Image: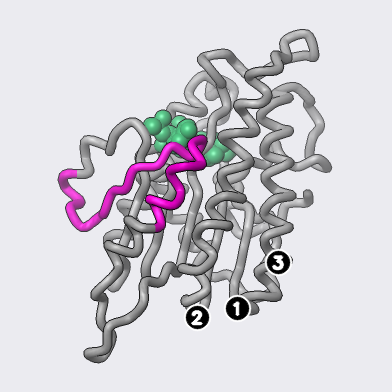
Amino acid sequence: MNVLIVGGSGGIGWALCKTLSTLPNVTVMATYRQGVPKEAEDYSDIVWLPLDVCEPSQYAPLVEGITEVLSGVQDKGVEQPARLDWVINCVGQLSIDQAQPEKNLKSIEAERFAKAMQVNTLPTLLLAQYLQSLLRRSTAPRFATISARVGSISDNGLGGWYSYRCSKAALNMALKNISIEWGRLMPNSCTVALHPGTTDTSLSKPFQANVPEHKLFSTDKTARLLIGVLMSLQRENNGQFLAFDGSLIEW
Ligand SMILES: NC(=O)c1ccc[n+]([C@@H]2O[C@H](COP(=O)([O-])OP(=O)(O)OC[C@H]3O[C@@H](n4cnc5c(N)ncnc54)[C@H](OP(=O)(O)O)[C@@H]3O)[C@@H](O)[C@H]2O)c1
């Protein structure tokens, strides 16, 4: 199985890379922006490719990089065309430009709102656009982005966090749309939005004070749970918003 983790250097992304790389017959490719994790030296099988998801010009070179990594792979002595089986986008930002998420309308700032959409929403569409031909060669393609329960409109009881909530709600719509288009094009594909649960990473650090200990997951736990969800996906899960325990979240 060939897997691409987008944002492999982040808390959840890196845990997914490590866990997947220990499974048999899995090739893990991962993207980084600023640098690869220090621990990456101990996982030399993981192949790293550069990608700033906010730079549209970097997607075509990413496809070239993946194709190069996968070229020459043989099955029963026959060279196979490059193929991706799973893509998991783990890139996301909550605090934009060091600013805490908005508590009220007064704190909305146009540029930060646009940046939230640029980093949390648009990249999933560009990844789908650029990676479609590689995923199409898989017998059971899986395409997932880590969303967030706070992107659910029906679950929103607290308000606040305007840019993050709006960008994740828009991300969810993007994933739903992709699932419909690919449901026709690749009937065995599954496209989902995933909620990881509150996970101990740099993104959640400033907001952990009121989270009960048992509700704050380690990145390794989250990775195990999300891989379990992805492994158990069936055709009917296409286009769903799923939590770390496989339960359905309403849009
Ligand atoms: N942690 C939680 O409790 C929680 C809860 C719900 C949802 N989520 C979602 O889970 C996902 C992963 O978050 P995390 O908790 O693992 O956060 P994290 O540790 O801060 O990781 C975020 C990743 O995004 C990357 N990134 C940011 N901007 C980028 C850009 N322009 N181009 C490429 N990469 C970029 C970062 O790369 P650099 O290192 O290069 O900056 C980093 O790898 C996010 O979508 C987040 O919204 C997290």
Give me the residue at 70% from left, 62% from top. 239
Classify the position of the N terminus by image quarter.
bottom left
Q: What is the number of callouts on the image?
A: 3
Along the line of sight, which residue is nearer the eye, 94 or 187?
A: 187
Q: Which mark is residue 181?
A: 3
Which residue is identified by label 1?
Answer: 188
Along the line of sight, which residue is nearer the eye, 215 or 103?
A: 103
User: From what the image shows, is residue 248 above or below residue 52?
Assistant: below
Which residues make up the magenta segment?
A: 41-63
Q: CA distance from mark 3 to mark 1?
A: 12 Å
Residue 202 appearing in the image: yes
Q: CA distance from mark 2 to mark 1?
A: 7 Å
Give me the residue at 49% from left, 28% from top. 203
Q: Position of residue 187 (x, y in %)?
A: 64, 78
Residue neighbourhood size for the residue with mark 3, other residues' Cα within 10 Å, grouped as few (<14), some (14–19), many (≥20): few
Residue neighbourhood size for the residue with mark 1, other residues' Cα within 10 Å, grouped as few (<14), some (14–19), many (≥20): some
- Amino acid type, residue under disc 2 in the picture: Thr
Q: Are marks 3 and 1 in contact (CB under 8 Å)?
A: no
- Amino acid type, residue under disc 3 in the picture: Glu
User: From what the image shows, is residue 70 above or below residue 94?
Assistant: below
- Amino acid type, residue under disc 1 in the picture: Asn
Q: Nearer the viewer, mark 3 or mark 2?
A: 3
User: Magenta stretch containing residue 120, yes or no?
Assistant: no
Which residue is identified by label 2?
Answer: 139
Q: Earlier in the sequence, mark 3 or mark 2?
A: 2
Q: Position of residue 61 (x, y in %)?
A: 38, 50
Give me the residue at 78% from left, 26% from top. 158
